[in-house]
Image (cartoon, rainbow, N blue to C red):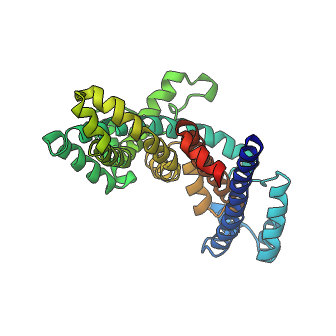
Amino acid sequence: MAPKIKMNSAKYVAGKALRMLTLLIALCIVSFILVKNSPIDPVQAYIGADMMRVSEEQREQIAENWGLDKPPVEQFISWAGAIVQGDFGTSMIYRVPVLTVIGNRFTASLALMGVAWLLSGIFGFLMGVIAGMNKGKLIDRAIKWYCLTLAATPTFWLGLILLMIFSVWLGWFPIGLGVPVGVLSENVTLSEKIYHLILPALTLSIVGVANIALHTRQKLLDVLESDYILFARANGESGLGLVWKHGVRNIMLPAVTLQFASFSELFGGSVLAEQVFSYPGLGQATVQAGLRGDVPLLLGIVLISAIFVFTGNLIGDIICSIVDPRIKEGRASV
């Protein structure tokens, strides 16, 4: 039985790896086609304000230096071959290796998304449990109204509202950026980084609460209406003890799965939030790369973000198999 389980586990991992490889190849092709059909001229975006001072010969030299003079198919093959060797190329905007830009920006984005992901998961789960325990009451209706309103609220709009209230009117938080203006990176303290992180993280957390809360509420209602809950109540169990023992434990698994599956929404929301708050993360770099035709950086970010989202989903699957052994048994029996 053990060799069979190991074999099925190996097949599962191999299937996940193959799926990820297929996804990355498809993303590379689609992204490259979209970038090459963009109305933005990479050479013109590279030159910038000095466009009138650059001759046609110099433009051709710039295009040749970046490989933009070759046919699109040849450009893609050259870029893909370099990616296989671990070379993501050089950013046309920052003039440094793409991996260096992504590494620096991803660290800032990871801090932002990590805080928002943790807060939205905790508060979303608690709100869902409270709403499920008080079905039809005022607090349940209030939580549902709050979540449905947030689900229809654009991230950038909410960010602008919070920025206007807490930064412009009240002056509690800085208007933007990830560190104080005019301070060298080595002189920035941890408290200053957290101070600049609060408002963008709060924006992402508020938006991310909605799906978790509504999903948790519905799952808890399904559990509380099941037969074994009626049996537990017949045996004298009630209140928080009943909900914790038979309710919360049964809804934690789908809540965790949904939370890890929300990595793509979290990353998309961070792009908008970083633009609103001028937060120097990967999302802002993505927008800059798209607007200025930085093909190597944009494609590199697409690959890294796809791996990030896929890893989140994979972690969710692994946690599910650990928390619920039935999933592991079902996988082994296939």
The image position of residue 166, as x and y in percent, is 31, 36
Does residue 124 appear to the left or right of 106 in the view shown? Answer: left
Residue furthest left as drawn: 138
Q: In the picture, residue 2 is in which quadrant?
A: top right
**Looking at the rendering, in which quadrant would you find the N terminus?**
top right
Comparing 221 with 184, the one in front is: 221
- Splitting the image into 4 quarters, where does residue 100 fall? top right
Q: Position of residue 136 (x, y in %)?
A: 15, 46
* Residue 302 left/right relative to 245: right
Q: Quadrant of residue 54?
A: bottom right
Residue 269 visible here: yes
Q: Position of residue 182 (x, y in %)?
A: 55, 31
Q: Tell me if residue 232 comes above or below residue 31 in the rendering.
A: above
* Residue 147 x, y percent position in the rendering: 28, 48
Image point (34%, 53%), residue name:
157
Q: Residue at x 32, y 43 (%)?
A: 223
Report the residue at 48% width, 34% height from top: 115
Is 17 placed left or right of 195 in the picture?
right
Taking depth in this image into account, of 177 and 8 the one nearest to the observer is: 8
Q: Residue at x 52, y 53 (%)?
A: 264
The image shows residue 264, relative to residue 50, as above or below, that is: above
Camera-nearest residue between 297 and 234? 234
